[in-house]
Image (cartoon, rainbow, N blue to C red):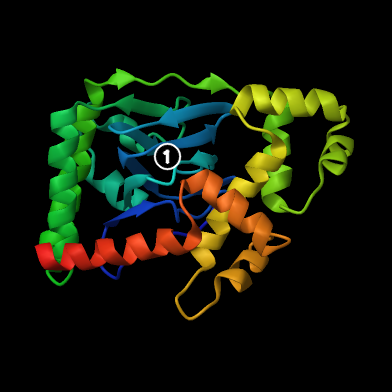
Amino acid sequence: MSRVKLSFPPGQSGYLFFTGWDTDLRYPHSHEDLELNIIESGEVVYLIDSKQYTLTAGSCLWLFPDQEHQIIQKSPELSMLVLVFRAASLQRMVTSETAAPLVDRQQEHVMCRKLTTSGVKEVLRTARRLIEHDGFLEYREAGITWLLFSVWELFLEAEIIQGKACHWAVEQALKLIEADLSLQIPEVCARLNVSQGYLSSLFHQELGMTIPQYRNRRRVEDFLMLYEPQKTILDCALEAGFGSYAQFYRVFSRMLGTSPQDHFREAVDGKHDHRRDV
């Protein structure tokens, strides 16, 4: 398991940001601090403790220190609030039984629930105000602390999201593919000592897509993270692992429902519209 070192701003107990399709760290990993995820729109699927957790708008997930997790699917329209808080700072703050689970390093359960619509709206609105005050450190420090415990209060009364068991062969196949996207199905099957037909059927049954489809989704995600205006679409597509522009164009258009050129044109227009609204 890979342990990721989170980078905190100097003198701050926590930080927060919005992320989406470009969310990285899709391989199995953990970290030594507390992370909170709240889905604003779209969908993301986590693999935690050999179970799949599907998070949609309003879903809230707490990731505790040393809890291994991995993103295995996400939709193009995903928007997610991420709040990270130093475990050491939280340990000093928590004194009540109500908040005690937040500092339980032996947490055995996945904390995943669906918050109320009104609660989510208030949390996301507050988060955006805090992000805007990036030069007022005291304001952000107090605000992030308040937001963390406010979400916990909402969470305690929320509906539990149950995980779906993931077959060991699918879980291990995902880890192998994440480690090397060029790995072919026969080699994956050989390493797991299962037949190709069995693994292919099981993979589709568990994730709703074939192994090649999953691999192509991951390559599109890599492309979107690699792409910059000063680079060509073809260069980024090849770097992401596609064999040709034709293959990339076909997969990209099928997944996002638009061509690469139209996708980036719409993204630029959206930014311009946002600036006019401001």
Q: Is residue 262 left or right of residue 90?
A: right
Residue at (65, 21) in percent of width and height: 205
Is 173 drawn above or below residue 88 in the view shown?
A: above
Is residue 218 toward the left or the right of residue 101 in the image?
right
Q: Residue at x 45, y 53 (%)?
A: 23
Q: Is residue 92 above or below residue 266?
A: above
Nearest to the observer: residue 150 or residue 266: 266
* Left or right: 238 in relation to 45: right
Choose top left, top right, bottom left or bottom right for residue 121: top left
10 Å crowding of disc 1: few (<14), some (14-19), many (20+): many
Q: Quadrant of residue 147?
A: top left
Residue in the image at 81% along x and 23% along y:
198
Q: Amino acid at mark 1?
A: Phe
Residue under label 1, please give it: 64
Q: Quick one: SS at disc 1?
A: loop
Query: Is residue 210 something one can see in this rendering?
Result: yes
What percent of the width, then of the height, locates residue 170? 70, 30
